Image (spheres, grey):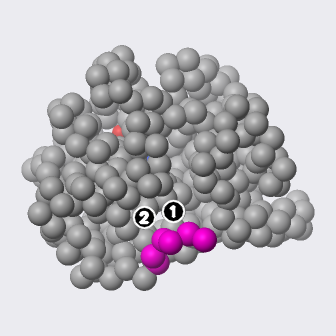
Amino acid sequence: MSDTKHNWTKEEILEIYNKPLMELLYDAATIHRKHHDPNTVQVSTLLSIKTGGCPEDCGYCPQAARYHTNIEGNDLMSVQQVKAQALRAKASGSSRVCMGAAWRNVKDGAEFDEVLEMVRTINKLDMEVCCTLGMLTENQAHRLAEAGLYAYNHNLDSSEEYYKEVISTRGFEDRLETIDNVRKTNVTVCSGGIIGMGEKEEDRAGMLVALATLNPQPESVPINALVAVEGTPLEEQEPVSIWDMVRMVATTRIVMPETQVRLSAGRTDMSREGQAMCFFAGANSIFAGDKLLTTPNPDVNEDMEMFKLLGLNPQKPFIKKMQPETVEAADSQFQSLGEKPKWSRPDHTIERNEQAKEKAKTLR
Ligand code: SAM
Ligand code: DTB
Ligand code: SF4
């Protein structure tokens, strides 16, 4: 039985966030090593499969068509290009590829069919495949699941209250609805947010309440520090302090003990010491490669040097929270990796997988 708490309040989370730092670090690290191997960090690679020209008005995003940023827009990449990039990512130690598209929502048709083919292709490379394509219907979520998608990223980005200050073309409720549609399948949920957009500590806590009270909690929570891009409404924001980042990571770890906490955008401005503190506080994933979607990220060789220095090992794919269609398939995948599962699959995922398979049949 999992001891994860689901009824967190904003007050409780703020109290944790504002603890004396040494206590916060100690508490987070204690919880971290109870649920995870503290020396293992997942390396994921981002691939922007369709860049720029997005109709939305997310105030942080360089890909919104209405802002005049210096990014180079691109139409949808080909399956072959994606395969080549995924192979390169695998060779450099990545176990997950996350494909991002600058879309408001997924539209059925030739482009979505291509994305499904990309998912199948990366799946065959024995890598976890994640997509972040904007809003999804339930039917589209099932089609992605059938293609073998491992995770879907859809961030809440901030608290419900602050969300309105940053984005007007869709609402917080729309985000929750897509997450709910993903939850109806066997695809794992990746949802987190951004700090440094001018929000208050209450908003950071509010976002964590929204994530931690989801039942089940997201399997993966990216914490991004805003990359303030020239031309976006948030271009003048002050850089996030490393102390805020550490506090946010530690608090996320405490309220969502089993989740994979991703130290995401903003690492180019963080020292190795700062990142080490984030790993100690419970971060157990990074995005590697010299580009995130459109903005710079540390070079993979620098990251591997950092791993060596800190004694960290890149995580193999499918170690945790794998949700293949059957329990038997899960067992055989673990055996083929020569690993014993450290965490058992929660019952709800087995039940959900059965429901998802039935549903998928009716949608075909
Ligand atoms: N269009 C899809 C969507 O909005 O869900 C997927 C791509 S979108 C770029 C994925 C996430 O990247 C956003 O939800 C946001 O959290 C993050 N992001 C975008 N721009 C960022 C920035 N300048 N700094 C930090 N994170 C950013
Ligand atoms: C997430 O939370 N962060 C990643 C991933 N999910 C898709 C994206 C960060 C994007 C940073 C801005 C850019 O490079 O365009
Ligand atoms: Fe479009 Fe996503 Fe960027 Fe918002 S965050 S403008 S939806 S690409």
- Crowding near the residue tagged with mark 2, few <14, some 14–19, many ≥20 C-alpha atoms within 10 Å: many
Q: Does any atom of ligand 2 lie closer than 8 Å to the CB of label 1? A: no
Q: Is residue 100 left or right of residue 144?
A: left
86 with respect to 64 (left or right) = right
Q: Dot 2: what SS?
A: loop
Residue at the (51%, 62%) spot, across then down: 218
Question: What percent of the width, then of the height, locates residue 198?
Answer: 16, 62
| 2 part of magenta stretch | yes
Circle 1 — which element? loop
Which region shows up in magenta?
Answer: 1-6
Residue contact at pointers 1 and 2, CB within 8 angstroms? yes
How far apart are the two marked residues, 1 and 2, measured between alpha carbons? Answer: 8 Å
State whether residue 33 is above or below residue 129.
Answer: below
- Which numbered circle lies on residue 256? 2
- Is any part of residue 315 visible from this angle? yes
Q: Is residue 275 above or below residue 180?
A: above
Work out whether 135 lies above or below 270: below
Task: Name the residue located 39 percent from the left edge and 53 percent from the top edge.
Answer: 32
To which quarter of the image does residue 181 belong? bottom right
Observer able to see residue 163: no
Nearest the viewer among 130 and 276 is: 276
Residue 208 at x, y percent in the picture? 35, 69
Who's the residue at 23% across and 55% down the image? 25
User: If you read the primary sequence from the N terminus, does the residue marked by circle 1 or circle 2 appear first?
Assistant: 1
Give the residue pinned by disc 1: 218
The percent position of residue 151, horizontal first and vertical second, equals 60, 51
